[in-house]
Amino acid sequence: MIVVGAGVVGLTCAVRLLEAGHRVDVVARDLPLETTSAVAAAIVHPYRAGPVDLVERWTARSTAVFAEVAGGGDSDEHGVRVLPGTDLVRGDSTAPVVDMPRYLSWLARRVEALGGTLTRLNLSALPSHGDVVVNCSGLGARLLGEDRTVLPVAGQVVVLEQVGLERWALDDRTATSPTYVVPRLDEVVVGGTADDGEWNRTPSPQVAADIVRRAALLVPALAHARVLRHKVGLRPGRPVVRLERVGRVVHCYGHGGAGVTLSWGCADDVAALVAQA
Ligand SMILES: Cc1cc2nc3c(=O)[nH]c(=O)nc-3n(C[C@H](O)[C@H](O)[C@H](O)COP(=O)(O)OP(=O)(O)OC[C@H]3O[C@@H](n4cnc5c(N)ncnc54)[C@H](O)[C@@H]3O)c2cc1C
């Protein structure tokens, strides 16, 4: 079968489908490290995604799988750790934190090790005949799913040098300017913004300065950290995630600000839909 999309959703679905014994070819305009998924901070936390009941179930499932991944193997390889942190609204807890460039590379290696393929291909429509197609095209579903309800929610982040930080921090009380600090293994991602309907991917220096200021208020140790990079990613916003089978096409897109968080839960449901005759 064909999986369209090589972000976290497409690669995770591909892994599950390969494990279920299917032959899987992943095709994507952007390879894993070029996707929105590579920009994500990323903490396992349901943000800007619906519907509430399914998001809760998918998050619980993904949390369990990420904990398993973190508990086995080398975090230098897969990039997944369970870290303590502070959520200004919900209090202190632990959550899986995912170093996305490492993790996406690890997922891509898993796809290939399980016998799948990954090919760059820019589609103008979903393949119209042949085997089952799993549509994990994120924002691209606006075209490929002919779905005008999919809209970008732009998010800017600043990548700072690691200063020995091993805790995350989150303050999402303001809808358009959530503040978060997420340690990767050798750098720290701080954010952010959430601009509905914004397609511009050019980082703004003023917004970056404000992000660093807000992050340093949450975590003072970051006040003098060196800036490594600026990034803007376009979250695939949709009123609710679309996960359904229509004929030979299984759609799985519109994960908003929670594609990492929902990835394993959704991939299990996709595998179940593919298994239906
Ligand atoms: C700043 C920021 C911070 C974030 N932080 C978090 C976080 O902490 N936790 C969390 O869970 N989520 C977070 N997210 C959200 C998360 O990044 C997204 O929900 C997730 O990346 C969506 O994954 P995806 O695989 O659906 O889409 P993408 O990563 O966008 O991948 C889509 C794939 O489809 C392909 N595609 C699209 N159109 C076509 C076409 N026509 N032909 C061929 N291929 C096509 C693309 O090339 C790409 O390979 C964040 C996002 C941003 C921007």
Image (cartoon, rainbow, N blue to C red):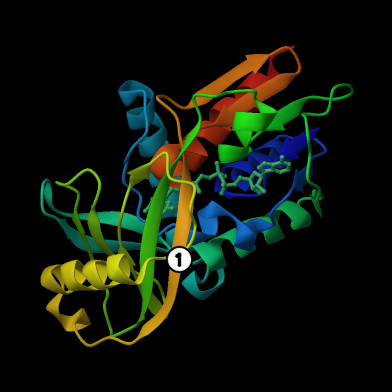
Percent x, y of residue 136: 63, 36
- Taking depth in this image into account, of 61 and 119 the one nearest to the observer is 119
Q: Is mark 1 within 8 Å of ligand 1?
A: yes
Q: Is residue 242 left or right of residue 14?
A: left
Q: Which quarter of the figure is the N terminus placed in?
A: top right
Query: Residue at the right extreme?
Result: 130
Kindly identify the residue that appears in the image at 44 percent across and 52 percent down: 66
Residue 167 visible from this viewpoint: no
Secondary structure under badge 1? strand
Q: Is residue 65 above or below residue 82?
A: above
Residue 209, by quadrant, is bottom left
Reply above or below: 105 against 233.
below
Q: Nearer the viewer, residue 90 or 145?
A: 145
Q: Quadrant of the C terminus?
A: top right
On the image, which quarter does residue 138 sit in? Answer: top right
**Is residue 266 at all visible to an observer of this figure?**
yes
Q: Nearer the viewer, residue 214 or 196?
A: 196
Q: Position of residue 125 (x, y in %)?
A: 77, 30
Residue that numbered label 1 is attached to: 231
Residue 121 to residue 105: above or below: above
Q: Residues within 10 Å of mark 1 (few under 14, many from 20)?
A: some
Q: Amino acid at mark 1?
A: Lys
- Which residue shows up at 35% across the image and 55% down it? 43
Q: Residue at x 57, y 42 (%)?
A: 9
User: Could you tell whether 152 is left or right of 46 in the image?
Assistant: right
Residue 259 horizontal/vertical position (percent)? 46, 43
Question: Residue placed at 39% from the left, 78% from the top?
Answer: 187
**Lateral position of residue 174 relative to residue 48, left or right:** left
Q: How many marks?
A: 1
